[in-house]
Image: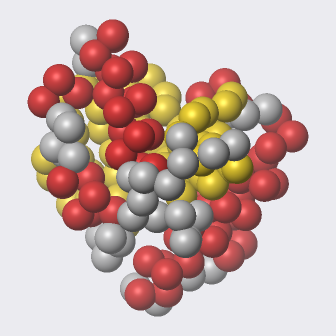
């Protein structure tokens, strides 16, 4: 892992910066399936942005991504998890999942997540205990009971 991973609550004025992170983090996966549209990627996060559910990811004090956890059907929904390219595959995402799983354990519930079908994130989620429960045209959907993960 590169540096200590910590989290910081987002505020309303963070919306544009978070949208830029999402666009950059999703670019490669969306280009792979011919669906990269920076405006659509930006608008998707802005249309559902909820500062109360959003946390910045910091590595050694530097913002390197963000995640969004909302109450969902039967548990928690990990709606977004983005780590900037160049900071991926360093254990940062695993640190985020540990935080999310701890939250789910306290609530006694499962965690759900969706991933773009052609994204490397599918292997990441499977490696951390998520089980595929549904496939749609562009996305895979997973569930994990936090006590079974990591």
- Name the image quarter holding the C terminus: top left
**x and y percent of residue 36 in the render?**
56, 81
Classify 51 as above or below 80. Answer: above
Classify 21 as above or below 110. Answer: below
Q: Please indicate whether residue 90 sits to the left or right of residue 146 in the image.
A: right
**x and y percent of residue 39 in the render?**
71, 72
In-front residue for pair 120/71: 120
Quadrant in the picture for residue 48: top right
In-front residue for pair 146/19: 146
Q: Residue at x 18, y 28 (%)?
A: 145
Q: Residue at x 68, y 29 (%)?
A: 9
Quadrant in the picture for residue 127: bottom left
Confirm whether residue 16 shows in the render. Answer: yes
Quadrant in the picture for residue 71: top left
**x and y percent of residue 125 in the render?**
26, 52
**x and y percent of residue 56 in the render?**
64, 40
């Amino acid at each position: 892992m590169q540096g200590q991973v910590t989290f910081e609550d987002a505020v309303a004025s963070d919306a544009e910066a978070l949208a830029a992170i999402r666009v950059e983090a999703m670019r490669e996966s969306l280009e792979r399936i011919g669906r990269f549209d920076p405006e659509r990627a930006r608008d998707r996060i802005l249309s559902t942005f909820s500062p109360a559910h959003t946390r910045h990811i910091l590595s050694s004090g530097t913002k390197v991504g963000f995640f969004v956890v909302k109450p969902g059907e039967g548990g928690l929904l990990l709606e977004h998890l983005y780590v900037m390219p160049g900071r991926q595959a360093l254990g940062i995402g695993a640190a985020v999942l540990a935080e999310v799983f701890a939250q789910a354990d306290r609530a006694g519930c499962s965690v759900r997540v969706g991933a773009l079908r052609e994204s490397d994130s599918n292997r990441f989620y499977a490696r951390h205990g998520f089980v595929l429960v549904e496939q749609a045209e562009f996305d895979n959907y997973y569930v994990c009971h936090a006590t079974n993960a990591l």
